Amino acid sequence: MRSGHSARYWSAHRHLSSEIPVRQFIPLLRSGTWSDRNKAGNLFVSLTATRDDAVLATLRAEALDSLLEMGRWRSKGHAMAARVVLARMAGFDDQRLGRALSPGGNVDEILNAFEPR
C-alpha cells in the first residue's frame, strides 16, 4: 500500500489500530534505512491518533530513544512524524501540538517533555 493510500486507509479505519501488532513495527524505527524509519513513523502517527494508552505506553517503553533521535533531525519533514508521536506521548492535545509544530513554534517543548526532571 503506497503511503498516501495507507494514510487515508488508517484515517478511515482508526478502530482497527488496536489490532495492529505495534511491537512488530518498532524495530523499523531503529533501522539504518531511511524508508523503514519514515514508513514506521507515519504508521505510528496514524496509530497514535486516538491516543490509545497501550500503544503510547509501548512506544514509550520500547521506542523512545529512536523517536527522540528522529525528532531532533534538522529536516522538519523528516522529523515531523516522530515529533507528532512524541507530542502525543507527552500528552499534548491537538491545539498544543499544532502550536509547537507551526512556523515559529517551539519544537523543543515536545523534545524537552522527555528530559529527566
Image (tube, rainbow, N blue to C red):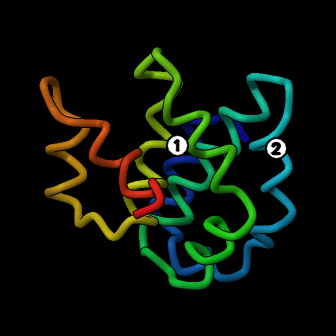
Sequence-first disc among 1 and 2: 2
Indicate the position of residue 41 as horizontal and vertical percent values: 61, 44
Q: Secondary structure at mark 2?
A: helix
Residue count near mark 1 (Cα–Cα under 10 Å), binned few <14, some 14–19, many ≥20: many
Three-letter amino acid code at the position of disc 1: Ala
In the image, what residue type sits under mark 2? Leu
Q: Is residue 56 above or below residue 64?
A: below
The correct choice, above or below, for 105 with respect to 67 in the image is: above
Q: Which mark is residue 22?
A: none
SS at circle 1: helix
- On the rendered structure, is 49 left or right of 2? left
At horizontal 70% and vertical 56% (from top left) the residue drawn is 63
Asked whether, in this view, residue 36 is left or right of residue 12, the answer is right
Q: Looking at the picture, how far across and down is residue 40, in whole percent?
A: 70, 45
Q: Which residue is drawn at the image coordinates 37% and 48% (left, top)?
A: 112
Q: In the displayed orientation, state which residue is furthest to the top.
A: 75
Q: Which part of the image, by quadrant, shows the N terminus?
A: top right
Residue 71 lies left or right of residue 95; in this view the side is right
Rounded to the nearest whole Å, what is the CA distance between mark 1 and mark 2? Answer: 13 Å
Q: Which mark is residue 82?
A: 1
Q: Position of residue 4 (x, y in %)?
A: 54, 36
Residue holding disc 2: 28
3 relative position to 62: left or right: left
Whole-percent x and y of residue 81?
A: 50, 40
For disc 2, the neighbor class at 10 Å (few under 14, some 14 to 19, many from 20) is: many
Instruction: Examine the image and state in which quarter residue 113 appears.
Output: bottom left
User: Which of the two residues, 7 or 34, is positioned nearer the viewer here?
Assistant: 34
Using the image, determine if residue 103 lies above or below residue 24.
above
